[in-house]
């Protein structure tokens, strides 16, 4: 909507203002002629009436032009928001099916995720806040893993630093909030992963962030090679 409102003054500046200036110059000339002492009062009224008609015509023409432009611009914006409905990528249930489908390993979710549900910028930004190495095979964080998605996915469970839990939950809640804002703003084809769309997981993360466990050294991550479903929350 910002693009619409910011462009409206340009329309007046390039088109209507030029017309008004031209009308003012013409009306000024007519008025100076009507002020001539030899001109009758009836001619003065007739000249002034003519100027008013011209000005009204120019204003009406300009308003019609602006309204037509706004209508086309608004329709173009609506078309961008709606667009054709599409289905998200199905990653399957494990890293084999996820890789075959073209899904992406999300290090903040520690799950495979459909491209439509993956927020690479946010995930990378939050994951950078977790100490490195990020993942381990043991609860006491003594057997570090590389950040190779294939290696991580082959384990049934892994562990991470206690900071990871808060980062993971922040990420999931932020994705849910972003989707909610997009839907309320009228966007269509809004996608959300099954963790962020799950009421139980949202409640769990809310508790984890508002009431963190003291002196927690490591966090357990089950089934890191599994895939999250990507849901359409608005058609």
Image (cartoon, rainbow, N blue to C red):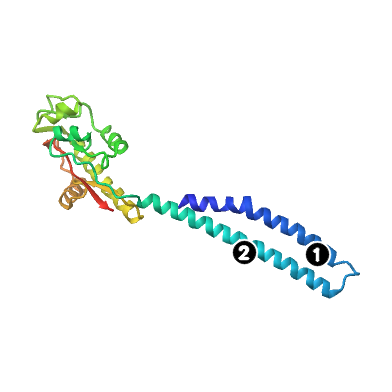
Label 2 belongs to which residue?
60
Going by the picture, which residue comes out furthest to the right?
Answer: 38
Residue 217 visible to the viewer: no
Q: To which quarter of the image does residue 186 belong?
A: bottom left
Q: Are marks 2 and 1 in contact (CB under 8 Å)?
A: no
Q: Residue at x 51, y 53 (%)?
A: 5
Residue 63 visible to the viewer: yes
Q: Relative to 12, is 129 on the left or the right? A: left
The disc placed on residue 131 is: none
Q: Residue at x 73, y 59 (%)?
A: 24
Q: Residue at x 48, y 55 (%)?
A: 72
The disc placed on residue 31 is: 1
Q: CA distance from mark 2 to mark 1?
A: 22 Å
Q: Residue at x 61, y 59 (%)?
A: 62
Q: Residues within 10 Å of mark 1 (few under 14, many from 20)?
A: some
Nearer to us in this view, 83 or 98: 83
Q: Position of residue 226 (x, y in %)?
A: 13, 37
Q: Relative to 10, is 42 on the left or the right? A: right
Q: Residues within 10 Å of mark 2 (few under 14, many from 20)?
A: few
Q: Relative to 24, is 15 on the left or the right? A: left
Nearer to us in this view, 128 or 13: 13
Q: How many marks?
A: 2
């Amino acid at each position: 909507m910002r693009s619409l409102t910011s462009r409206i003054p340009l329309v007046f500046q390039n088109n209507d203002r030029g017309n008004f200036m031209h009308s003012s110059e013409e009306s000024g000339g007519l008025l100076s002629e009507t002020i001539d002492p030899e001109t009758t009062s009836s001619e003065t009224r007739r000249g002034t009436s003519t100027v008013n008609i011209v000005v009204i015509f120019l204003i009406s023409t300009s308003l019609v032009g602006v309204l037509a432009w706004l209508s086309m611009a608004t329709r173009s914006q609506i078309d961008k928001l709606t667009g054709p409905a599409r289905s998200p990528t199905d990653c399957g249930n494990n890293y084999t099916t996820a890789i075959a489908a073209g899904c992406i390993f999300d290090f903040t979710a520690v799950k495979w995720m459909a491209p439509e549900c993956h927020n690479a910028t946010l995930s990378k930004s939050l994951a950078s806040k977790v100490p490195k190495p990020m993942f381990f095979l043991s609860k006491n964080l003594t057997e570090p893993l590389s950040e190779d998605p294939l290696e991580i996915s082959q384990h049934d469970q892994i562990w991470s630093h206690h900071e990871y839990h808060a980062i993971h939950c922040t990420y999931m809640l932020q994705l849910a909030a972003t989707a909610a804002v997009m839907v309320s703003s009228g966007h269509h084809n809004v996608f959300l992963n099954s963790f962020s769309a799950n009421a139980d997981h949202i409640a769990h993360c809310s508790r984890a962030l508002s009431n963190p466990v003291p002196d927690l050294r490591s966090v357990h991550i089950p089934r890191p090679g599994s895939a999250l479903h990507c849901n359409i929350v608005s058609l």
